[in-house]
Image: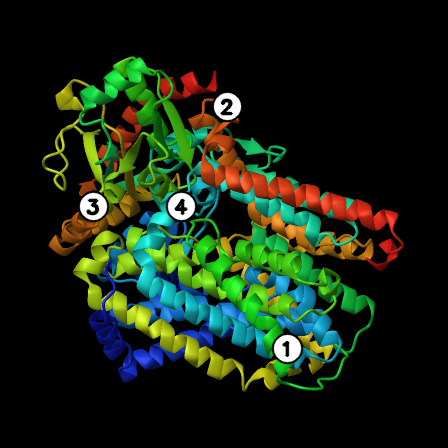
Amino acid sequence: MEFSWDYLMQGFAVALTWQNLFWALFGSLIGTLVGVLPGIGPSSGIAILLPLTTFLPPTSAIIMMAAIYYGAMYGGSTTAIVVNIPGEASSVPTAMDGYEMAKQGNAGPALAIAAISSFVAGTLSLVGLTVFAPLCANFALAFGPPEYFALMLMGLSLVISLSGRALLKGLISMALGLLAALIGQNPLTGAARLTFGSVDLMAGVNFISVIVGVFAISEVMLNIEAEASAISLAGIKNLMPSWADMKACIGAMLRSTGVGFFLGLLPGCAPSVTTFVAYDLEKRVAKDPSRFGKGAIEGVAAPEGANNATSTAGFVPLFSFGLPTAPSMAVLLGGLMMYGLQPGPMLFKSNPQFVWAVIASMYIGNVMLLVLNLPLVGIWARIAIIPFPILGPIIVFCSVLGTYSIRFIMFDVWVMLVFGLVGYFMRKLGFPIAPLVLASVLAQMLETSLQQSLLISQGSPLIFFTRPIALAFMVLSAISIVWGIWAQAKRKDGVIVEETDE
Amino acid sequence: MGKSVKLLLATVVLSMFFLQGLACAQEKPFPTRQVNYVVCFDPGGQSDRGARIYQPHLEKVLGQKVIVDYKVGGGGALGWRELARSKPDGYTFAGFNIPHIILQPLQQEVGYKTEQIVPVMIFQRTPLGLAVLNTSPIKTLQDFIEFAKKNPGSVTVGGSGSFSGYHMATLRLEKLIGAKLTYVPFTGSAPQMTSFLGGHVTAVFGASDDLTIHRDKLRVIGFAMDERFPGFPDAPTLKEQGIDMAEAVDRGVAVPPGTPEPVIRKLESALIQVAKMPEIQAEMTRQGFIPMAMGHDECKAYVQKMTAIYKDLAAGIKK
């Protein structure tokens, strides 16, 4: 794939036809909607719409489905900020500071910065996709099982910073997440684990069920208990972020674009992973990390930028190798194949007008989403004042529908409800939930890459230290763990010990 | 007298109803309402694409709507367990894969047995081919064998899943060439091919459609087929190089056990009619598959034959 202005201009010519503009807008709207609704994610959205799009020409259909994917990245932040329930797995870290901002009456600026950050990161990543796709594609290939293991280990080391002051509780929460992820078949050998002879349990615990359960269901339960009349009682004071806020976030937006884009080139690094990394990075570079978790606006900008960067980056391996990086991408790949388009190196040669039209439409779609999201900030923020007796059942309904639509089995719904209970008790007892979610997201890749690496090296763990990229990640995770524990220890010696705060 | 006339009339009327009912049943044979085609893998995957290619044509031939439904999990096992428990009336059928339905019950209790998946027809074959990167110093199967013999265990062969066709192919090859190989399983063909293209495994047993996608980056040193794969006319088979093994993933349609013979035959003829359509065959070929039209009886015999082959191999791994 060689970049050329000619191709890009031709792409815009196709993307700017009325028909394609309509489908980009339609996809953006559906994407925002599935993003806003907790539980219902882009992969289910695309999968459900896929068979209905057969009457469309391939370019329009793929433009629409791509728009659903990146549109969902815009929508996911809404409920995360307003009612502390991430609309998507990719907006879990957004809730940590976003909801705090909302509680302080700043839901408007939080939503606005989420939209702006999404737009900035989405557009910058598109430039990356447009211009550097061939280089980026090779970057993805440099990652073999040992590099993945080291990267996932580094991901897991974020638990320390996500745990706040309750390190022990954070580690317990992480262990619970890893344990839950072990249920079902070993992803490589297919051997049944922790199934107690039940064939149902062999399906395994899907991390979407875990996320929806611990966030949506437990939040609803807590509100029932509190006899809440509305989930967020804080008024909405202002809608747009101030210049100071914007300035504070520029760095976060750029950094999260970099993190989200490069990690997003790797299969398996879905937005649900990269958002955590971006959030953690912001916390590390902040002058005052203690503001995080208490309504730091960078804590909203970073994950929201990262998930858009990641979703765009995923198109690089999809188009250039035919390799999906996330479940939604796999469905999109299926869509391409159904239309008789074979992704891979040949796609750019045999169907350049198609590829460039889709890329051009993504620039347009991002503008549409910014326009859709910014003026509508006020409307989204008002979700918070929907009376709880109405909003609560809607959330539960969407959660059931959303978890069922992942694999179309009831088992996932039961798992979601069980994790609703788990989340409820964890919150009551002051256990941080983020480590559990992170662990359940990372567990499978962590395990499979470890097994594969040791097979390749014939059992020698040296493989993680003799390959430069793997070594770099191993060193980073070691630093992260040591530094995290040291910082904890130092705080214990000092004056500020607020375990009760958690 | 009056009473018996009434009785007679009643009998006649009743029998007429009965006959009419019978006539109805004869006039409108299976299917009289929509049928469900259960796909046991993710939307957009190979099984789903196969189903989607068939769906519109099958609707025309059967004269009823065909709804594609998903039951995903356990590498297909969840959907097949559902199938085995479904009402055997032909209104629910599912896509099935060989060797999956043979190997899964051999490995452990998965809630169904191979015999409970009654094959109606097989429409597609995806042969596996042993491939290396085109930059690899290994040029031929002979090079590969020599290299493997000199470096026992350090030659890695990537595949998708354990107890899968890829795994079996590697084990069979290992036995036939008499050198130790290390099989590295991946969670699907996408990560398998990524790792292969990045040079993280020595070789792969790749599915023909994946090999077709990446053909300009790799060299197939032997297809596990009896004759050459039409999409790669220059690539030799393993058999012509003295390694007699064939390994493929076959996809077809199956019904629950106890489905009446006429219903199976009806579905079989409808599916074969679709399979023989030139546009279907062209589409399958283009995507890198071999279009097939193997009927019910032939499928049953084929499943039995493959079960015998896999039983020994599976017993070997479990030890």
Residue A15 locus on image (x, y percent):
28, 77
The residue beneath circle 3 is B288
Quadrant (top left, top right, bottom left, bottom right) of the C terminus of chain A: bottom right
Cα separation between marks 1 and 2: 50 Å
Residue sitting at 69 percent across and 63 percent down?
A287
Residue A401 locus on image (x, y percent):
55, 63
Cα separation between marks 4 and 3: 33 Å
Residue B270 locus on image (x, y percent):
22, 51
The residue beneath circle 1 is A245
The answer to whether mark 4 and mark 3 are in CB contact below 8 A is no
Dot 1 and dot 2 within a common chain = yes
- Give whichever of A379, A56 is nearer the camera: A379
- Count numbered badges in the picture: 4
Q: Amino acid at mark 1?
A: Asp
Tell me the SS state at disc 2.
loop
Neighbor class of circle 2 (other Cα within 10 Å; few <14, some 14-19, many 20+) is few
Dot 3 and dot 2 within a common chain = no
Q: Amino acid at mark 3?
A: Gly
Tell me the SS state at disc 4.
loop
